[in-house]
Image (tube, rainbow, N blue to C red):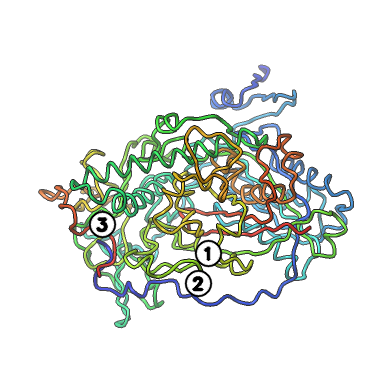
Amino acid sequence: MATSRNRSSARRTSPSIHRPGPRWSGRRVYMVTGGVTKFAKAHPSMDFRLMVKRAYDQALAEVPNLTRDQIDGSRISYFSDHFTRQLKAASMVQDYLGLNPKGSVRIEWGGATGGECFQAGYEAVASGRMDVCLAAGFETMSRVQTWKGNEFIALASDTNFDFPLGGFYTGYYALMVIRHIYEYLRLGKFANVKDEREAQRLAIAEGQRIMSWVSVKNHLNALHNPYAQYPKKLSVDDVLRSEMISYPLTREQICTMSDGAAVAVFCSEEKAKEFTDKPILVKGVGTGTDTMRLADRPFGKVPLMPHESARDYEKLRYPGVHSFRAGRAAGLEAYRHAGIENPTKELDFIELHDAYASSEIQTYEDLGLCRYGEGYDFVLQGDPFLKQIQYPFPVPNAGAIPVNPSGGLIACGHPVGATGLMQGVFAFWQLQGTIAEHFGDPKLQIQGAKRGAIHSHAGTGSAVTVSILERGF
Amino acid sequence: MAPLKKFDKFRDIQAEIDRSGSAIFQDANGVEALIIKSPYQINYIHSYAEDSAFFLGLAEGHLLGSRCTNKECGFVYATPRGHCMECGEPTAWLELPKGGKLHSWTTCHFGSEAFLKETPYNLCLVEFEGAGSLLLARLKDCVESDLYVGMPVEARFDPKPKYSITDVWFVPAKGGSAPPKAGSSGRGRARP
């Protein structure tokens, strides 16, 4: 075992996230409108400028008092210059929308690009630099073939040590979930199986089955979301029997590449009142990071949520490659900012970055929805499922804390620079109570939703953002 | 000049673009888009810089990690780095054991375009006695059903080095592939 030796590894904790946080002295910031294009495998008749324009026009049409002249500036996000082979594409969005010469900056932070852009828009207003800020994001991934696209994404791993081994993000996440399954199913539910290989195989089969429940959930929810790329009715067997991509992850447990755009508009309190009677407060923001290379992740102690105890994790070496410390750090900061002590009790839903069904389960634990090690049971008990949807298995606790009511990345698609903003728009509509109006179908509306979280995640958990939104009316 | 071929399914366009370099896509609303081939190739002058000794070491059959030179710290990295992530002091090179254990593993049935022809291939994270971090590598000469977390593995080196991380890979250790009995170590957890 790697880590129990000589070592100084006891010191490898996360000192910065144990400190009490800074005081948040910024202004209150409201989201007043949002827009999103349908996410699709390809939008060949729209380029990124037109996609953003469509989402922007949708957003502005909903708040007639908000005109282009009142926008003080923008934050524009996309992940990879490779996908379009157009550097400074954000400048082209800025001028297509006619926003010159107002201030703007491009945001990029891997898979969390959209979530970072959401927070950059928030910060421009919180700091007092702007009263009205547009956050816009996009990605056009269809301009290259899927396996070339995978290569571009994998260039967001260390090109000396990681990329030349296969350049494949699904492989990295498979390594992480094999270890997660080992820690929590092999050493949990299957602790009494004597034969090591058999025990690990049984644990992996159980993990695959439970990950398939997550895939079934997200695809089924998306049947009621017209913006989703791959809504479908799947059985657990359909998911298990879909193509093996990187053991133990199958095709239906993995998000796909997409074209799409999304925008959000942030305002000061005073301005928000001019534009809408249904503003949504950005109650808290948090970010976290971790090593680029999986191989460098530490084996230390768990930074605790207020409702957890050190005794819960006496034997756990954290985060290793089984958990996302950046997600825990982002959650802790956002919860502290929003005054949340127990997220499951104080949040009504989460739009969570489920690039993989495995990472959705790992993230339940990072965000404190359940304790580390309880993620699989959390699924089997039904907590992250919607009460109003019929799933092909019993989900007794459905509605406890719905995760990805929209369908998440697995079913909605993942045009990277837009994804975190898409989550923001779906959460905004949930909290406004306008899902029926926007989806043309009331099914996914969580009745009385007052507070929700959005979570955006970059390469193997190297960066994560969490933002808390709350009904402001 | 031959007229451009028109397609209403995007997935059908690729072959035509490869063949003739251009085509028309017509979407469900009748909007037409002109699609062309836009090639892009580049050879970078890539320097391994401060990681160079590791790759030179592989070419000579040595697996190098690094150890923090700060005596108070002394952290050992299985994937070397020039400065310590814990305390910021410089590190020194050190030779790692040739064998270790699987911390995790997977079999990739797909990969980036550049590696598709090599599929399926195995990836593993290896833990070494005395090191506090791991190494990511290929795992060969085994089948998926052999593999388990905790399995002993040994390094092999390419006799014709390409100066790439793929110059080293791991194989199941000779005589060491039988799994430990339940309750023994290999758990990746803190010892009491």
**Identity, as a three-letter code, of the amino acid under mark 3:** Leu
**Identity, as a three-letter code, of the amino acid under mark 1:** Gly
Q: How crowded is mark 1: few (under 14 residues within 10 Å), some or many (20 or more)?
A: many
Q: Which of the pair B177/A387 is nearer the observer?
A: A387
| Residue B163 appears in the figure | no
In the shown orientation, is residue A467 left or right of residue B157?
Answer: right
Question: What is the distance, in whole Å, between disc 2 and disc 1 at their CAs?
Answer: 9 Å
Identify the element where label 2 is drawn.
Answer: helix
Question: What is the distance, in whole Å, between disc 3 and disc 1 at their CAs?
Answer: 34 Å
Q: Which of the pair A12/A168 is nearer the observer?
A: A12
Kindly report which numbered mark, 3 or 2, lies closer to the viewer in this rendering.
Answer: 2
Residue A6 placement: quadrant: bottom left
Identify the element where label 3 is drawn.
Answer: helix
Q: Mark 3 points at which residue?
A: B58
In the shown orientation, is residue A304 left or right of residue B73?
Answer: right
Q: Mark 1 points at which residue?
A: A288
Image coordinates for residue B92, horizontal then vertical, percent: 30, 73
Q: Which of the pair B121/A465 is nearer the observer?
A: A465
Residue B41, compared with residue A339, is above or below; it is: above
Q: Which residue is drawn at 40% across and 33% down?
A: A240
Kindly report which numbered mark, 2 or 1, lies closer to the viewer in this rendering.
Answer: 2
Q: Are marks 2 and 1 in contact (CB under 8 Å)?
A: yes
| Quarter occupied by the N terminus of chain A | bottom left
Q: Mark 1 lies on which chain?
A: A
Q: Mark 2 points at which residue?
A: A17
| Residue A303 appears in the figure | yes
Identify the element where label 1 is drawn.
Answer: strand
